[in-house]
Structures are given as C-alpha cells and as structure tokens.
Image (cartoon, helix red, strand yellow):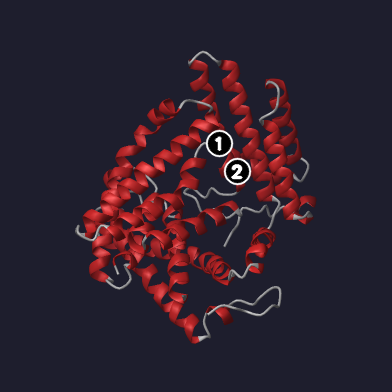
Amino acid sequence: MISLTSPVETRAHRWRAGAKLGALCVATLALFFAPDTAWLGAALALTLGVYALPPWAFLRAGLSRLRPVMWVAVLIALWHGLAGDWHEGANIALRILTAVAMANLVTMTTRLSDMLDVIAWLLRPAARLGMNTRPAELGVALMIRFTPNFAERARQLHHAWRARSIRRANWRLVMPLTILALDDAEHVAEALKARGGVAASVPNPDGGTSNGT
Amino acid sequence: MERNITMVALFAALIAALGLVPSLTLAFGIPISAQSLGVMLAGTVLGAKRGFLAALLLVVLVLLGLPLLAGGRGGLGVLAGPTVGFFLGWPLAALVTGFVTQSWRGAPVAIAASVGAILGGIVVLYGCGILGLSLIADKGLWASAVLMTPFLPGDAIKAVLAGLITQGLMRARPHAVLSRN
C-alpha cells in the first residue's frame, strides 16, 4: 500500500511521531489565537518555508496536495467577502490553508509504521485494563492488505463490463464487488481459525500473554 | 470472533476501494464518488456495531496517512479541511444506518435499508458535515446547510441504491448480510 509519506527523506522522518503530533496540536491551536491577518500570513509563509528546506520535489508534492484545499479556501474567503467581511474571509482562508499545510507536513514526514506505533502506545492503557487489542491490530493489517486488492478487482470488473456492454458501468459493479468482499471475509475468517484464531495470528509486540479467544 | 474482524476489516477496505476507482461514477453520469455509498452499505449489510467499526477503521487509517479518500486524499490535513464533519461523521452514519436496518424487521429489507441509509447517510451525516463546515468556515449553520444542497440529489440516489444492493445481497449471500441475521 502506498502511503502519503514523502519518499524524499527529510530530517523530520527520523523525529518521533508522537512529538510531531504533539507539536502539530499546539501549532494548530495557536492559529486560532493569531491576532490578525499579518500573523496568519506569516504562519503560512513559515510553513511553506519549511516545505522548501528539503529538495524541491518535497515542496512540489506538498503544494500539489494543498491545491484542492486552496480552492476551497478561496471560495470560503469569497463567501465571507461577498457578505461584506473581506478581513474575516482572508483570516479564515489563511487559517485553513496553514492548518492543512502543517498537518500534511506531519503526514509527509512520518512513516505508517511510526504512526501505528503511536496508536499502539495510545491503546496501551486499554490493554493494561484487560481489553484485547489484537482484533484492532489484525483489522488494520487486513484492511491495508485488502484495499489495493479490491481496487484492482473493481478495475477488472470494469474491464469485463466494458468488453460486453456499450452502456456505462456504474453502480451496477458495486454489488458484485461487495459479494467478492463478503466471500473473501468468510474465507479469511476460516483461514484464521485454521491457524489457531486471533490469539495466534498477531505477534504480541510486548511479549505478554494473550487473553484472546 | 474471526468472522467479525474480517467482515469489519474487509468492508473498510471495500469502502476505500470504492473511492479509489474513478470509473465507478454513479447513475446518470454524475461523477459522484461511490465512497459514501460504501459507508451506507457498511451499515445496511454489517449492522450498527460492525458498520460503525468498519467506518471507524477507515477514518483511523486515513488519519494515519493512507490516501484512501476519493481522489487519493488522506492524512491529518483532512481534520483541518472543510469536509472534516462528513469525514468524522462516517462511523456515526454507518451506526444509524445499521441500527435502522437491523431493528425494522417488519419492513422488506430494501425499504428498511433505504430508510436507514437516508437517516444515517443523509440526515445524520449532513448534520455532522454542516456542523464541521460551519466551524471551519466560521459561518452560520443555515448558510452552511444551503451550501450542501447541490450534493443532496446524489446522496438520495445512493441511499436508494444502498437499499436495492442490500436486497440483492440478501438473495445472493443471505448469511453474509449480518444486519438481518
């Protein structure tokens, strides 16, 4: 599965994911206390400046991800502006753009495995209270494994339709695709049971004993 | 246990796949992503609890940085964007959709699922979406609601389709439609 992590290796790739997420929360909150447009503009310029620190490919990828939000931000600014408050409109558009740009920055510099470690860390108190976290771990793994598979089969169904019909394939493909998914779910469940069930299927990172059934 | 996990995980993967395949535009050539149809189906097929978990799994993985939203979007930026309410409302939408489908046994499955999808996938989801847009854009709820109206017809079609597809699944795989078992 391709993730949104940037292939351009930056220094921030090595920072701790939890620290980056914490910093992001603080920075985003700070945006709501920025006193006026100049401060917000400076925040956006600073964020984009950080994008420009690694090689250019990083900035280019970051800007292309920001483009859809940019249009929405412009629309929201117009929406406020036409109601007579251009100042407020500019503030909100800048705030949205900066917040999204900062969040994308964390996403682009953090590997999926590091993010999963943060989730495991967040779940640790629940595990200590006796909650079984293996179903969640297994669910994440299965979903990552099967998404490209289903996307590929949707494409195959689409090709099969196009080879046989002059009409457009549209929602009619959703039902066969859903049947494929349900059948796969049954098969994978059987395969898991045959291999000892949930308890045996996911290695416990902490090496503790399992209480799964 | 194993079956519950695989059903939830693979349905989350199905919702994601529905958003990734651009050729799956819906009826009348309107280029609407089939992804929200997937969220409705999670409720109508899996029922309230598992449908909720499937949508929640998708939400978590998108936030972790997988490009699973329609158009390959994803990452933490979604939380700061104008669609945040719709995105975070998905689990709740699947929950309500599933609850109606599994509770209203008196009605034929197509009706119960369609009504469930309208209540969950439109009433509840638009409620969340409008609240989110209103907070992000700093506009009133009413003004935000008006901005959403162009998307209503598409989602109404999807709700009816969710009912029809669930009925079809009931015939093809009666034991897999967990909401009615």
Quadrant including the C terminus of chain B: bottom left
**Residue B52 picture location, percent across and down:** 44, 57
Location of mark 2 (residue): B77
Asked whether disc 1 touches disc 2, contact meaning CB atoms under 8 Å apart, the reply is yes
Give the letter of the chain under mark 1.
A
Q: CA distance from mark 1 to mark 2?
A: 9 Å
Residue B115, percent from left and from top:
27, 50
As drawn, A41 above or below B91: above
Residue B171 found in image quarter: bottom left
Percent x, y of residue A27: 72, 38
Residue, disc 1: A69
What residue sits 40% from the left and 76% below the top?
A: A186
Q: Residue at x 50, y 37 (%)?
A: B132
Q: To which chain does the residue with label 2 belong?
A: B
Residue B23 at least partly seen: no
Q: In the rendered image of this protein, does residue B105 appear above or below residue B29?
A: below
**Looking at this view, is B26 or B135 the one in front?**
B135
Looking at the image, which is closer to me, A80 or B44? B44
Q: Are marks 1 and 2 on the same chain?
A: no
Q: Amino acid at mark 1?
A: Val
Residue B68 lies left or right of residue B76; in this view the side is left
Of the numbered discs in the image, which one, if any, rests on residue A11?
none
Q: Amino acid at mark 2?
A: Gly
Mark 2 is surrounded, within 10 Å at the Cα level, by few (under 14), some (14 to 19) or many (20 or more) other residues, namely many
